[in-house]
Image (cartoon, rainbow, N blue to C red):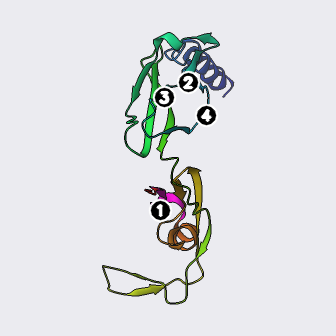
Amino acid sequence: MKAFKISLLSLFAIALLSCKKETADLSSTIHYVSFHIKGENPAVVQVGEVYTDAGVLATLQGKDVTSTITIESNVDHEAMGMYKVEYTAVNADGLKSRAIRDVIVCNPNVTEDLSGRYTTQTGTERLTLASGALIPYPGYHATITRLAPGFFSINDFLGGYYAERVYPQYGYTVMGMTGHFALNE
C-alpha cells in the first residue's frame, strides 16, 4: 500500500512538472484613448452663425494623441436642430474610442419658454394597437427642459406613460419616448 501511495505521488509530481505554460503572456491590459471635450456640451450656436468647434483633448496612457483623432460633423448652421460632432481614435490594438459633442442650432428670436412639469388630465388614454384596448393614465407627468432659445428636451412625449408606467415595470430595456423639439418664430 505504501508503494502505491509513493507511485501515485510520483506520477502526480511528474504530471505537475511536465505541464507547459501555454497561457503565459497571453493576457494583457488594453488601453483606450480618453477624450476631454473642451468648451460646452451641448454647444449652442444661432441660426446663420458658423459653428466653430472648441475641440477635444485626446490622451492614451497619459500621452497627448489629439493629432491622431478623426472628427466628423453634421452641423448645418442654416437650419435649427440638434447636430453631432464625433471624435474618434484608434489604439495600438485597432480598437476604436469615441466622444460626441451635441451642437444645438437655435433661433434666438424664439422667446417662448415651455419648460416645466406637465400632468396628464382625466380622460388621457393610450390605444393598444394589438388588442384595441384603451389604457387610461391620468395624473402622469412629463418634464420639458429648455436647452437653448426655442429648443427643448422632453423626458416622455407620451405624457409620462413610459417614464412613470413602463420603465418602473420593465426597466430601461423598453425604448421610451424621450427626445427634442424646436419652436419656430
Task: Answer with mark 2 or mark 3, whichever residue precedes in sequence.
Answer: 2
Element class at badge 1: loop
Nearer the camera: disc 2 or disc 3:
2
Residue 178 located within the stretch drawn in magenta: yes
Residue behind mark 4: 40
Q: Is residue 13 above or below residue 104?
A: above
Mark 4: which secondary structure?
A: loop
Residue 111 visible = yes
Q: Are marks 4 and 1 in contact (CB under 8 Å)?
A: no
Q: Earlier in the sequence, mark 2 or mark 1?
A: 2
Crowdedness near tag 1: few (<14), some (14–19) or many (≥20) residues, C-alpha within 10 Å: some
The Cα atoms of the two marked residues, 3 and 4, are separated by 17 Å
Spatial CA span between label 2 and label 1: 32 Å
Q: Position of residue 48 (x, y in %)?
A: 42, 36
The residue carrying pointer 3 sits among few (fewer than 14), some (14 to 19) or many (20 or more) residues within 10 Å by Cα, namely some
Report the amino acid beneath label 2. Answer: Ala
Mark 2, residues whose alpha carbon is within 10 Å: few (<14), some, or many (≥20)? Answer: few
Q: CA distance from mark 1 to mark 3?
A: 24 Å
**Label disc, if present, on residue 98 of the rendered structure:** 3
Q: With 175 as the anchor, is 4 left or right in this view? A: right
Residue that mark 2 sits on? 54
